[in-house]
Amino acid sequence: MELVKKALSEASKRGFVPGLAYVVGDTLKDVECGRKAGIKTIAVATGKYSEDELFECNPNYVLKGL
């Protein structure tokens, strides 16, 4: 989560609007990290977690792949 906060801080210094950010990942921890940072999340079922498993952790979106 610290990496996400740092990235948002640096991006906001350059005029980026944090509300437009997404955390994209293929693990439950990625979704948790984004949610704790207050960012929308996209879970991608390209790793060891299925779409159903990722959906259960309540991301904003779940994709089969990119």
Image (tube, helix red, strand yellow):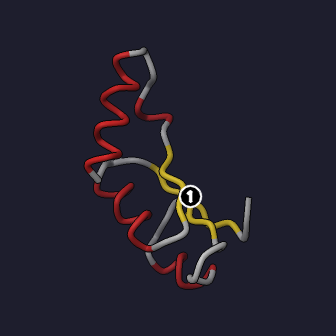
Q: Which x, y percent locates residue 6?
A: 29, 37
Q: Which residue is mark 1?
A: 42
Can you say whether 30 is above or below 8 in the image? below
Can you say whether 26 is above or below 48 in the image? above
Q: Which x, y percent locates residue 27?
A: 48, 72
User: Image quarter for residue 34?
Assistant: bottom left
Q: Which x, y percent locates residue 44?
A: 62, 66
Residue drawn at point x = 43 percent, y = 15 percent? 15
The C terminus sits in image quarter: bottom right
Q: How many marks?
A: 1
Secondary structure of residue under mark 1: strand
Residue drawn at point x = 72 percent, y = 71 percent? 64
- As drawn, which residue projects farthest toward the left? 2
**Circle 1: residue type:** Ile
Callout 1: 10 Å neighbours few (<14), some, many (20+)? many
Residue drawn at point x = 53 percent, y = 76 percent? 54
Q: Which x, y percent locates residue 18?
A: 40, 32
Residue drawn at point x = 48 percent, y = 80 percent? 56
Can you say whether 1 is above or below 19 in the image? below
- Closer-to-camera residue (7/62): 7
Can you say whether 21 is above or below 25 in the image? above
